[in-house]
Image: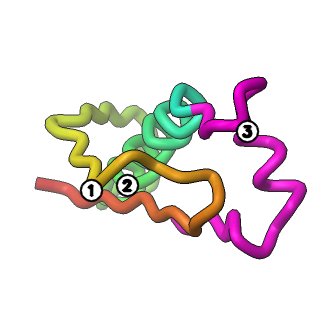
Amino acid sequence: VSYPFSTDEFLKETYRSPWGRMRFGKILEDLDALAGNIAFAHVQDPATIIVTASVDRIRLMGIPSIEMDQHLSGKVT
């Protein structure tokens, strides 16, 4: 999932905290949804719609900036 904060002002304002920083809790919500989508895509039988997902690790390459584009990724392990 990509967040084009550098070019999308509406998106930037959606994720901006009252202090001008990134609302990291909102990113964690998105990460939760991403984990569920990845788990659902991994299910082989479409009739089986119950999935579970967990996050083993969150690695930040630095302090997330609301001024720069950000990316979330995940995989089934």
Q: Which is more N-terminal, label 3 or label 2?
A: 3
Residue 16 marker = 3
Res 43 quadrant in image: bottom left
Mark 2 or mark 3, which is nearer to you? 3
Mark 1 neighbour class, 10 Å CA radius: few under 14, some 14 to 19, many 20 or more: few
* Callout 2 amino acid: Ile
Q: Is residue 5 magenta?
A: yes
Mark 3 neighbour class, 10 Å CA radius: few under 14, some 14 to 19, many 20 or more: some
Q: Which residue is mark 1?
A: 61
Where residue 67 appears, x then y in whole percent?
64, 60
Q: Is residue 55 left or right of residue 50?
A: left
Q: Is residue 19 magenta?
A: yes
Residue 38 marker = 2
In this view, the residue in front, 4 or 44, is 4
How far apart are the two marked residues, 2 and 3, measured between alpha carbons?
A: 26 Å
How far apart are the two marked residues, 3 and 1, measured between alpha carbons?
A: 19 Å
In this view, the residue in front, 44 or 39, is 39
Where residue 65 appears, x then y in whole percent?
54, 52
Q: Are marks 2 and 3 in contact (CB under 8 Å)?
A: no
Q: Is residue 35 left or right of residue 22?
A: left
- Secondary structure, mark 1, is loop
Q: Which is more N-terminal, label 2 or label 1?
A: 2
In the image, what residue occupies the spot 61% across and 32% down?
23
How far apart are the two marked residues, 1 and 2, measured between alpha carbons?
A: 22 Å
Residue 39 marker = none
Q: Which is more N-terminal, label 1 or label 3?
A: 3
- Secondary structure, mark 2, is helix
* Callout 1 amino acid: Met
Region rendered in magenta: 1-23
Res 72 quadrant in image: bottom left
Where residue 50 appears, x then y in whole percent?
40, 33
